[in-house]
Amino acid sequence: MAETTTRPTLPGGFRSAEQGWPELHRIPHPPRRIPLLGDVLGANRATPLQDSLRFARQLGPIYRRKAFNREFVFVWGADLVADLADESRFAKHVGLGVANLRPVAGDGLFTAYNHEPNWQLAHDVLAPGFSREAMAAYHPMMLDVAGRLTDHWDRERAAGRAVDVPGDMTKLTLETISRTGFGHDFGSFERDRPHPFISAMVGTLTYAQRLNSVPFPALLRRAAQRNEADIAYLNRTVDDLVRARRAASGDGDLLDRMLETAHPGTGERLSPENVRRQVITFLVAGHETTSGALSFALYYLARHPEIAARARAEVDRVWGDTAAPGYEQVAKLRYVRRILDESLRLWPTAPAFAREALEDTVLAGRHPMLRGAWTLVLTPMLHRDPAAWGADAERFDPDRFDPKAVRSRPAHTFKPFGTGARACIGRQFALHEATLVLGLLLRRYAFVPDPGYRLRVTERLTLMPDALRLHLERPEVTAGATAAVEEAPSEPRCPVHGSRD
């Protein structure tokens, strides 16, 4: 009789690094480690990601940090990340911050564990909702929401007031995903204060991040009570939205797919509970990250008027006098898209993703990992690795994404949407929306920053410029603004999922 073997069961819950990295002692950690407390000196509970970037610059492309009794391994070197992108050896790990969102998002697409069947079911049911045909159908609604933004900004400009960039981008992207995906209007631009859904969403994200910085969740008892109230509000909002849709059919949007579409292979349908979780996932993830990307792009355009002028010239050349650019015209804004990509390079609004070993392996031939061992990829540092991006990697330069430059870089060096099978399903939706909006805003406004403003980044699992306000003026064409933007090849290599990625 053939001998059978069973694999040992992985420990449940959070797995500290010493459980999966046999040669952990070879990986550097910050100096002045304190017994019981770990590497807490100099740490700021409000900016854990930016603390991690600071340690990354000090300690190199792989390092570890300990907070109380939990040790983490961080990776950002381009060669290490390229190895972690091997889907035959590594998979998504639902890391601590993401796992903290499971009370609200459960086994939604973003927070599902790899073994949970609803991820594949939902992915296969919803993927056609992001096809080219579906995207073209969303385009008129994106234009309509963008028109509500520009109407608001026109009023602010006429009154001589600066605009609240992160606040208004959040309104824009929430309305866009809620209308295109679920046929719902939150009325964000008709409100003086953020919609309660946004307040509850920010509350859950902030609480999920705070959980990472305390040794015992009981220390956040009051915050936990607020979080439960926020989750209850999110659930009620989505339940009302779904109830209204069941009473009156929609037009084939994402919610219709969730409610009516069976899996093409198995005939399974999403359960009512999973529908709620997917709707919350799309409403939160579908607007929070895109609003941050647009806000950072506008920050850089305001800081670099020569780049804004070149992009505006491209919009004028490609769109001409068209009042409402068509779906196909958006993809022709290649320089505007480069601005967006370069903003996502420096400040990817989903700033990290975790990978775990499917079997015992050796990372990049140097670091042994046991099955289930995991590491956190620091995307902003990957995007600043001089080995991939050059000695000037901290400088804002959209031409890093011209086709020739993209082809010259190794694969797996640009990861704003994660990697592999679990990469963001809505990335093309987000990129189309953001490119369209930047084109419309560039054509209409020149952006003038406050001379005293210095970029500060707010962290709530995602990243956002803090307190960014811009003055708006009528744009003027500057000398040299019409510099040619070279055409991409007929089949451009996508910097996220290209021929080698």
Image: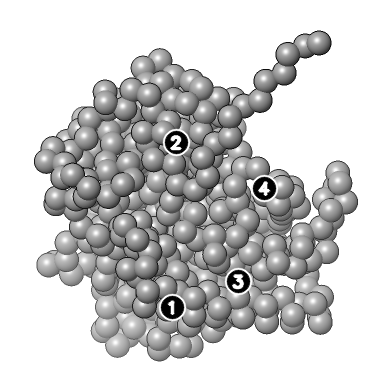
Query: In the image, is 210 to the left or to the right of 54?
Result: right
- The residue pinned by badge 4 equals 116
Q: Earlier in the sequence, mark 4 or mark 3?
A: 4
Left/right placement of residue 457 relative to residue 499 reads left
Q: Distance between the residues labelled 1 and 2?
A: 31 Å
| Residue type at tag 1 | Gln
Q: What residue is shown with label 2? A: 374
Circle nearer the N terminus (3, 2): 3
Q: Residue 430 carries which label?
A: none
SS type, badge 1: helix
Q: Where is residue 189 in the image (x, y as percent from the top left)?
A: 47, 83
Q: What element carries label 3?
A: helix
User: Which residue is pictured at 66% across the width and 56% down the height?
Assistant: 135
Q: Which of marks 3 and 2 is in front?
A: 2
Name the residue that disc number 1 marks: 225
Q: What element carries label 4?
A: loop
Q: Mark 3 points at which residue?
A: 178
Q: In this view, does 432 lie above or below 361?
A: below
C-alpha distance separating marks 4 and 3: 26 Å
Type of the residue with mark 3: Ser
Asked whether 140 or 192 is in front, the reply is: 192
Q: Nearer the viewer, mark 4 or mark 3?
A: 4
Camera-nearest label, 1 or 3: 1
Disc 1 to disc 4, C-alpha distance? 28 Å
